[in-house]
Image: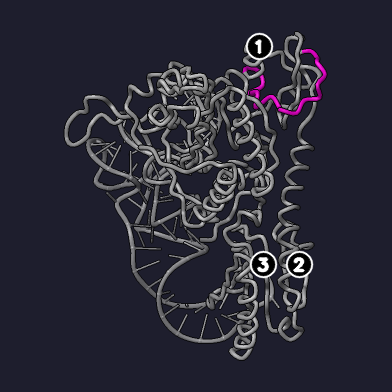
RNA sequence: CGGGGCGUAGCGCAGCCUGGUAGCGCACAGCGUUUGGGACGCUGGGGUCGGAGGUUCAAAUCCUCUCGCCCCGACCA
């Protein structure tokens, strides 16, 4: 139902929660730290799923499903992996009325159980590459939770692949990172910085982790997707071996990569405004809402006849919704659909029918600039143009915001200043000590070392030591 | 686990300091008027005041204990 939204400038965190709840995306559940995704939020997630899945299929990946429960011994097989996850595991010790011989872990991620199967499936170089994805839920016992961004249970996809060579696996890792970038920027309209994670931020068990980092409306960073080069760590732990063309036994090289329901939170935090949600047309569950307006019964008949024609014409091409609820005023409906982020609204009333036109209102522009009128016989081409323009404009707005709030920092003082309210791009020598000091003193962490570098070496912003690459420093969710 | 804040109708809150009939707004139900930017009027329903104990003639209000939630840190997609 309709609620007031706390302005983002007053309290960004409250603004975010208000939008998620007011737009009926999700709600807190009776189970602490868990989230109920409501139909509207789930429809948005389904569109995210489809956008990603289409890209996975196009690159030869297949979907499969592995069990929710993982034997404790599996998790313990890879040393770094256990260490990274043990505090946040949910463990089942009872089943069927008696204590289990071996506790079962509710999966925090599925590398281990998937490798147990990969070890059986892979015998020959002819079985490679093995390209598997699964859509599922995972559980991580987080201390503090936030709707979509961090919940105890969350939905995601996790891709797992096995390859004959390290080069192939690295290539796959970066291919999937690029797919995430492509989805984030072209469908979710979220500009991202693809890069490599620092040693301290990488996935437990990976050789190298990569991520796409996005800037939220409060200028904090959000990791919107990750892709890991696992090397042979899990292959060795689980004995995933194959015979190469020379009849020699070798361990496979692996990758894993994931995007979660957090992406929905990112869409809210990047595009939302004080009126509510703003959804990019490519992922919006409803792209166009039609609001008919009438006073008398005679007007109603006239308007509805026109509206039916419009729905018939647009319905086949776009995701449309007709809001003909009689008991609510048009103004109320306008506000409600704005809050829910529908990219384009069509208003059709007696005055429009008389003139053979409709009023189109864009969600991506301020109210004063958002309205235009179009002749009914040009409606569908105009809707098509506007949806494209809205998609492009939301991305452009977000990209400007990211660029305007990202600054090069040559000195430590500059870094401290920049990082208080934005992203800092600065040389980093690669030492964990410098990373830790910066985190301690500014609360900013290394979000990633961008793949794109200008190639010139420099001096570490912290210790002045030699540095080959620049890193992105920011506060993060 | 540390540091703050809050528990009163479905939701958001006032009342508490200074004890004395349980309140307001929104939402909900009925009727009527409305409908091009969150309509209005009248009527109505809805409460273990988070829980337990204590002080008192009398507790939402004072005291003690307890439970729960939210925010800020530590953990993290």
Residue at left offset 74%, top offset 19%: A469
Residue closer to the observer: A372 or A195: A195
Residue designated by label 2: A371
Residue designated by label 1: A431
Comparing labels 1 and 3, the label whose residue is closer to the camera = 1
Q: Find the magenta span and give its range.
A: A440-459
Q: x, y (%) of residue A52?
A: 57, 46
- Which quadrant holds residue A399? top right
Q: Is residue A302 left or right of residue A57?
A: right
Q: Is residue A289 above or below residue A272?
A: below
Decide: few, some or many residues near mark 1? Use Cα within 10 Å; few <14, some 14-19, many ≥20. some
Q: Is residue A456 above or below residue A299?
A: above
Q: Quadrant of the C terminus of chain A?
A: top right
**Secondary-structure class at tag 1:** loop
Decide: few, some or many residues near mark 3? Use Cα within 10 Å; few <14, some 14-19, many ≥20. many
Residue designated by label 3: A345
Residue at left offset 63%, top offset 35%: A175
């Amino acid at each position: 139902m309709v609620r007031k939204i706390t302005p983002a400038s007053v309290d960004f965190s409250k603004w975010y929660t208000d939008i998620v709840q007011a737009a009926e995306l999700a709600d807190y559940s009776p189970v602490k730290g868990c989230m109920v995704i409501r139909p509207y939020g789930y429809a948005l997630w389904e569109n995210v799923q489809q956008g990603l899945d289409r890209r996975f299929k196009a690159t030869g990946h297949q979907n499969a499903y592995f069990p929710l429960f993982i034997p404790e011994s599996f998790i313990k097989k890879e040393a770094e992996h256990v260490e990274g996850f043990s505090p946040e595991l949910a463990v089942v010790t009872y089943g069927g009325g008696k204590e289990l011989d071996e506790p079962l872990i509710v999966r925090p991620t599925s590398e281990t159980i998937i490798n147990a199967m990969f070890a059986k499936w892979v015998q020959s170089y002819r079985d490679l590459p093995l390209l598997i994805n699964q859509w599922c839920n995972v559980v991580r016992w987080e201390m503090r939770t936030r709707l979509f961004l961090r919940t105890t249970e969350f939905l995601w996809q996790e891709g797992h692949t096995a390859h004959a060579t390290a080069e192939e696996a690295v290539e796959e890792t970066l291919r999937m990172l690029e797919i995430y970038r492509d989805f984030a920027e072209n469908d979710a309209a979220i500009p991202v910085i693809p890069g490599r994670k620092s040693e301290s931020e990488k996935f437990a068990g990976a050789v190298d982790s990569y991520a796409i980092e996005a800037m939220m409306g409060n200028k904090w960073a959000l990791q919107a997707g990750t892709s890991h080069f696992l090397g042979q760590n899990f292959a060795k732990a689980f004995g995933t071996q194959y015979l190469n063309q020379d009849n020699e036994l070798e361990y496979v090289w692996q990758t894993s990569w994931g995007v979660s329901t957090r992406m929905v939170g990112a869409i809210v935090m990047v595009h939302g405004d004080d009126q509510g949600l703003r959804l990019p047309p490519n992922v919006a569950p409803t792209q166009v809402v039609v609001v008919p307006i009438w006073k008398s019964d005679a007007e109603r008949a006239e308007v509805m006849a026109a509206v039916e024609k419009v729905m018939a014409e647009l319905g086949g091409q776009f995701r449309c919704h007709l809001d003909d609820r009689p008991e609510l005023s048009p103004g109320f409906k306008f506000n409600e659909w704005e809050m829910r982020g529908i990219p384009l609204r069509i208003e059709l009333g007696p005055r429009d029918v008389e003139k053979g036109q409709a009023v189109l209102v864009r969600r991506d522009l301020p109210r004063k600039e958002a309205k235009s009128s179009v002749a009914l016989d040009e409606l569908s081409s105009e809707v098509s143009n506007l949806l494209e323009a809205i998609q492009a404009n939301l991305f452009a707005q977000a990209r400007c915001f990211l660029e305007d709030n990202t600054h090069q920092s040559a000195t430590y003082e500059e870094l401290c200043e920049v990082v208080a309210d934005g992203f800092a791009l600065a040389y980093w020598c690669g030492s964990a000590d410098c990373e830790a000091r910066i985190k301690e003193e500014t609360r900013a962490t290394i979000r990633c070392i961008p793949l794109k570098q200008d190639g010139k070496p420099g001096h570490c912003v912290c210790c002045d030591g030699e540095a080959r690459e620049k890193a992105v420093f920011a506060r993060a969710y």
